Image (cartoon, coloured by chain):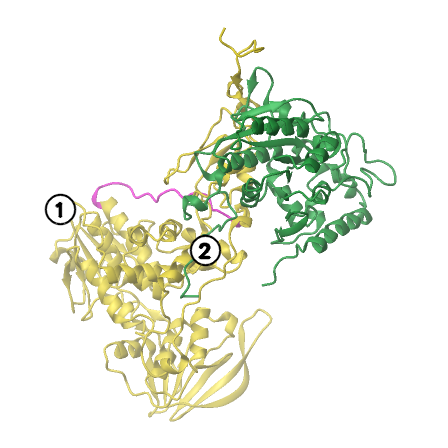
Chain colours: A yellow, B green
Amino acid sequence: MDRPFAITLPVGSSRANHTGSWRVERPVYVDHLPPCNDACPAGENIQRWLYHAESGDYEAAWRILVEENPLPAIMGRVCFHPCESACNRVRVDEAVGINAVERFLGDTALARGWRLPDPGPDSGRRVLVVGAGPAGLSATYHLRRAGHAVTLVEGAARLGGMMRYGIPAYRLPRAVLDAEVERILEMGVEVVLGRSVKDIAAARDEFRADAVFLAVGAQLGRRVSIPAGDSAKMIDAVTFLHQVAEDDPPLLGRHVVVYGGGDTALDAARTARRLGATDATIVYRRNRAKMPAHAEEVEQALGEGVTVRWLSTIERFEGERLLIEKMALNAEGFPEPTGELEELDADALVLALGQDTDLSLLEGSEVHVADGVVPVAESMMTDVPGVFAGGDVAPSDRTATVAVGHGKRAAKGIDAFLGDRSFERPERHPLAAFERLNTWYYADAPRTQRPELERIRRQTNFEEVVGGLTEDNALFEARRCLSCGNCFECDNCFGVCPDNAVIKLGGGDRYEIDYDYCKGCGICVAECPCGAIEMVPERI
Amino acid sequence: MTETRVHFYQVGSFAVGNRLLSDADRTVQASRERTNSLDAGHRACQGCGEALGARYALDAAMRATGGRLVAVNATGCLEVFSTPFPETSWRIAWLHSLFGNAPAVATGVAAAMRAKGRDDVRVVGQAGDGGTVDIGFGALSGMFERHDDVLFICYDNEGYMNTGVQRSAATPPTARTATSEAVGADPGNVFGQGKDLPRIAMAHDIPYVATATVADLHDLERKVERAMTFRGARYLHVLVPCPLGWGAASADTVRLARLAAESGFFPVFEAEHGVVTGVRRIRRRVGVEEYLRPQRRFAHLFAGEGRPDLVARLQLIADANVERYGLAPEEE
């Protein structure tokens, strides 16, 4: 009995009392799918790479980024970032500038010479990739990582597809394009330039390919018949942009009219301005709200002095005058002619009415074509075993990012095909909806604006219009991420538990619940900023 | 903006911790080395605000004093749920005597330490609102008046929750308790009664008086640390929501404390030598209704046609606090 005076029972800790038995619901940690990741056509794990960028570890961030997409510096410029439209932060202040951070990481990687991961161990199989646009390049990268040899055949003189011959240099500087393409080639790729594949089956035999990925894009500008005089100068936008890209711009004169309402129409009008047109006018049959072009592009074009005739169609083009007819929206929102005509000065008319894909190489093959595109399964395989298709060739939104995603998925599909496995898409976590967040905890911070070149400068040259972020800005922007649905180790659960029942593992290992003591009050769930904990009924 | 260093850390200083901050800038609660003064296995209800507030305050006091701390506890929930003999949840030197005498016992401990020449050992007295504003009030006022070297912390859950939710002098008007039933023309607790203890403490001209809630940990820890830089009598009044007595969901404890502060109904401020020196300004102002509605003790204000007249009177109290302490949010 060596107890202190007047103490008759030994003192015990309340830890003997397992209060966990009170519980009827238990908190569990979950990972939900952030809306940015959900929206990314290239399947990037955006939230995860932002997590590393937040701590300034740009290389780790970039490495996670290129797990999915080998072209971040390009995507950071030309992607229309559906991730930002989906971003939950929109409902707090403004979306996180994901695209700008992606570009910062891409540019930093180029500046510091970070290399893509090494190719996988040689599988002894060869894949023929037809077309070296975003889909073809992405597929090439992922196929090399899986260890397959790749023969990349391109009809044009240089690699890049529409990224080179469609997207103007003021949106995508060629040095950036060249550098990111070169980095993929460093993984060891057999490249055949200036060779148009005429017969898919013959090419497959010629290159002894075990599988083919068809990604020739949509290179044919759609034409409509417009009554026109002999002297009227008409060109389709694809040809126009291609010629400009090859440094051989056609002479269009001072008054250029572009017909169409998509991004290509804007690219054509903005390019015409840079080539010296005093006025570049877009004629579009519907109104601004219905315009398929992305709002940001429209804003930039208007800022550069491009004018738009909404609700107008072209009646006739004669000599230096263009006759347009005013339209009016009917009750269903469709444009109808009003009979009211107007004249426009026009030295040239550029048609930007959509693009078709040249699938003549499939003639005589078993590959099925419907509505000008190639239907594909989830693995991107056509109905001919071993022949896959993606990018603009497959039914899609026809953006560079979608193409990159197609390339990746096709590579996985081809890998499964070559390994005689069935293709399965990874399971998706449930969506991390805004309602799951406790936004109280996020600091208020508006979005960093990317500097734009002064308007006057971009009317005369092809310098890049949208600038990049400085490191401080990029860090700031990354830290605006709410980390929706995924723990970012803010210690809230560890702190707010009245029963000390959250164990902090630390160092990226997150936390554990100590169910011996957790009473199931739910405060950790309520106070988790990012919705990474949820209550589930206790099994009794 | 591009020229300045980045001082933006995703959750800033609102969350408990932040992997982007240096250890020194994180809270005591974010550290795996925190004392856990009040250990697991205690018998407080699910979601107890007082258990949370006590660990927050005492862990901060332990860090501020390098672990040389004695806590004296009045009778109340905190004492009952933490020490059913022979078990204890306390991992610090801890003493309990009676309901009404905690400030006097704390005075005695401080005197004993002085007599032993142990100036390094600091004393904290603690009680619920019953033990502070009602039963222990005489002893507390004496402790203030004598300027004894004690930090007294009141964990205010606005009633006698341990004995079955009776009204105290800290119960807000209209709140239903077992002794202020929601019946008659003026249901619940009456207007115009009760004590504002932080202001009474300030009237004693003691060196430090502060209020805090369990919804703002950084603020609470800073105030404990600040209090420990003074010698003499100091007072900290912490709002700790009580799921049982307030009739609230256990998960809402922190949220309710936040709404109390953001509505202005509970003013968060600090004062030195009787003068207000700092306030925690409202960040996202809400009306009192948003604070009152989730609590069943105010359910009669919203049942049927409700009592918008009484809600309006409660709003006036919040507005007066905002005015008196200058709590209005900063303009952009």
As drawn, the label of residue B245 is: none
Q: Is residue A259 left or right of residue B271?
A: left
Vertical placement of residue A366 versus B168, above or below: below
Magenta-tinted stretch: A418-434
SS type, badge 2: loop
| Residue A261 seen by the camera | no
Q: Nearer the viewer, residue B180 or B299?
A: B180
Q: Which residue is mark 2?
A: B8
Q: List x then y, in percent, for residue A23.
A: 56, 26
Count of marks placed on residues? 2
- Kindly identify which chain the residue marked by label 2 belongs to: B
Q: Is there CB contact under 8 Å for labels 1 and 2?
A: no
In this view, the mark in front (1 or 2): 2
Q: Is residue A431 magenta?
A: yes
Q: Which residue shows up at 72% across the image and 25% down it? A: B163
Chief secondary structure of the magenta span?
A: loop
Query: Which residue corresponds to mark 1?
Result: A124
| Percent coordinates x, y for residue A342 in the rendering | 50, 89
**Res B84 → quadrant:** top right
Residue A96 seen in this snapshot: yes
Residue drawn at 18 percent across, 59 percent down: A185
In the image, B122 versus A507, the foreground residue is B122
Q: Looking at the picture, which amino acid does disc 1 mark?
A: Gly
Q: Relative to B311, is A51 on the left or the right?
A: left
Q: Is residue B131 magenta?
A: no
The chain that hosts pointer 1 is: A
- Asked if A486 appears above or below A464 in the picture, the reply is above
